Amino acid sequence: MFLERVWISVLATCALAAITWGQTPTLPKIEPKLLQADLQIARKALEEGHSGIYRYTPKPELDRAFDSANKKLTQPMDALEFLRVLAPVAAEIKCGHTSVRPPKQISESMDQTIALFPFGIAIADGKVYVTREYEPNEQKLAGLEIRKINGVEIASILATMLAATPGDADSQTVRPWRVADDFNLDLYDLAGIKSPFTVEFLDSKTGKNRMLQFSGAPYPDLQKIAEKRYPQDAEPKDSAGLKFMDENKVAILTIHAFIGTAEGKELSDYFDEAFRRIHEHKSASLIIDLRNSGGGRDFLGKKLLSFLIGQPFFYYDDLVYNGLEFDFFRYADGAKPIPADMVEKRADGKFHDIKHPNLGIQQPSQPNFSGQVVVLMNGGSFSTTCEFLSNLHDRKRAIFVGEEAGGGYFGNTSGPTVRVTLPNTQVRVIIPLRTYYLAVKDGIPNRSILPDYEVKQSINDILSDNDTVMFRAIELVRK
């Protein structure tokens, strides 16, 4: 069996490598038995390696999803057609760190040569609106609602994307947030809609539909237009920033990611500096803006919490692996076993992390902030960010404003991650190996952190940069 799989892999790799990658590459069809073999490899890898695979979806339910997918593989398919069968099954695990991605060669073409949808979009109340135009000749389409693309109803497109998009638990915000963020790419690989794009718009001001056609452009060309036309959208250079208002009574700490640097300092050192400045300014209230903060280093979430908790505390309850290495590592270049001295095998048959710095009792940091805390969050608040949010929320240490966060309340599966390349299709499956259990008790099962004050941005708010979420937070601290 092993020799057969190796030979199949060589054939499939050669077939993909022989393609001349252009704007719309023609992909080879793959026989059903080879597609079914790849599905089984993906299934076994997820079952063996993903230590939180049944955390949100019971095994019988997930088994039915895999069996149903297998029944769809009765006709030859190309790699992207296969991806559209596998991705919704993997999404049923409800793990935002688990994903299915196109073969490397196709991803590279999507990054370089394939003509992509030339708009940035926002999803508001289940509708899709234009927020950015990346066509060379701007036509002032921002704010128009997209009704159809190439004759396909936008509701159908959204349903396809949402079903195949991974997200933690049953958070109501994480999947729409990710679909909006990746819409240009997902329109090609998940929805199968290619250039040229015939788009039907609805102008809410006139109540009339408009039909326009666009050729789209490769990602580098879209990026050049974006950088010139929308400089405000550029990624921030610093991972965090601190400012003061109301005569220093209110401090606003914005964290874009729990990794990197801020003001030339490593983020851990920057947190020390930030809370020293907050203490020196004698600020009574602190607003922490964690919107679109997708995570980072585990340690930094715990460190931020340590400035807001005045007593020793627990952050993680447990960290679990199914094993130290797995048979599917043969399909994953660079996969390394979990070091045996980092874990201990217990009576449950699992391997438990014993050396993570966030395990055990944690001490508060100085200068500790005991004033009012208001936190801003949305569906882009994920991973390490949600670990911090859950611990803060469970201790009732803050007021939460915005929308439901994107990560599971009680933890996630992430940490060491393996990229499995399926031998026949070259489709890649991203499998995290370590499941996190937070030291929290107060959350709603299968959901994320819910806001105390829900504030949703309308399309007009988004287009006018009217930050109603921050305005609400400032209103709360002033009261």
Image: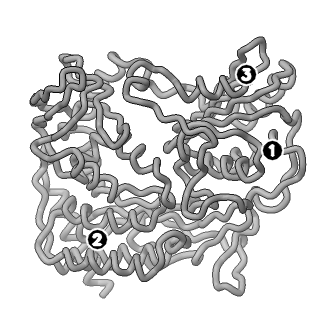
Q: CA distance from mark 2 to mark 1?
A: 46 Å
User: Which residue is under mark 1?
Assistant: 306
- Whether residue 259 is visible to the viewer of this picture, yes or no, is no
* Residue at x 41%, y 26% (from the top left corner): 462
The kind of residue tagged 1 is Ser
Horizontally, residue 202 falls left or right of residue 336, namely left
* Residue at x 80%, y 30% (from the top left corner): 275
- In the rendered image, residue 131, in percent from the top left (x then y), is placed at 32, 27
Question: Which of the image's four quarters has the N terminus?
Answer: bottom left
User: Which residue is under mark 2?
Assistant: 423
- In the rendered image, residue 384, in percent from the top left (x then y), is placed at 62, 49
Quadrant of res 339: bottom right
The kind of residue tagged 3 is Arg
Q: CA distance from mark 1 to mark 3?
A: 25 Å
Q: Say how many tags the image has.
A: 3
* Cβ atoms under marks 3 and 2 closer than 8 Å: no
Of labels 1 and 3, the one closer to you: 3
Question: Quick one: label 1 or label 3, which is nearer the N terminus?
Answer: 1
Q: CA distance from mark 3 to mark 2?
A: 59 Å
The residue nearer to you, when weighing 422 against 12, is: 422
* Residue at x 59%, y 64% (from the top left corner): 445
The residue nearer to you, when weighing 414 against 124, is: 124
Label 3 environment density (alpha carbons within 10 Å; few <14, some 14–19, many ≥20): few
The kind of residue tagged 2 is Pro
Label 1 environment density (alpha carbons within 10 Å; few <14, some 14–19, many ≥20): many
Horizontally, residue 139 falls left or right of residue 442, namely left
- Asked if 213 appears above or below 344 in the picture, the reply is above
User: Which residue is under mark 3?
Assistant: 478
- Asked if 368 appears above or below 33 in the picture, the reply is above
Label 2 environment density (alpha carbons within 10 Å; few <14, some 14–19, many ≥20): many
Q: Helix or strand or loop: what does disc 2 sit on?
A: loop
The residue nearer to you, when weighing 68 against 475, is: 475
